[in-house]
Amino acid sequence: MQTTSDIYAHVTKEMNTEATDILSNVLYAKKAREN
């Protein structure tokens, strides 16, 4: 059985990954428009 901290760490990691993906997509789109 997972402990609460394990679940919390997993959720935080997922959210960070998602945020990083969104951020890199935004930056990529911005760069693509400038070219």
Image (cartoon, rainbow, N blue to C red):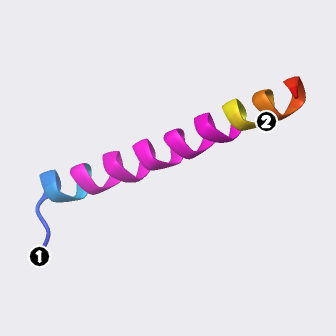
Q: Position of residue 22 (x, y in %)?
A: 62, 41
Question: For residue 12, what is the image quadrant?
Answer: top left
- Give the magenta-colored segment's residue range: 9-25
In the picture, measured across the screen, residue 13 lies left or right of residue 27, that is left
Q: Position of residue 28 (x, y in %)?
A: 71, 37
Give the residue type at disc 2. Ala
Check if residue 7 falls in the magenta segment: no
The mark that comes first in sequence, 1 or 2, is 1
What residue sits right under mark 2 in the picture? 29
Residue ID at (23%, 58%): 7
Q: Position of residue 1 (x, y in %)?
A: 11, 76
Identify the residue at image location x=14%, y=69%: 2
- Quarter of the image with the C terminus is top right
Q: Nearer the viewer, mark 1 or mark 2?
A: 2
Q: CA distance from mark 1 to mark 2?
A: 42 Å
Q: Which mark is residue 15?
A: none
Taken as a whole, is the magenta stretch helix, strand or loop? helix
| Mark 1 secondary-structure assignment | loop
Residue 8 position (above or below residue 28): below
Please determine whether, in this image, residue 30 is positioned above or below residue 9: above
Left or right position of 21 against 25: left
Q: Amino acid at mark 1?
A: Met
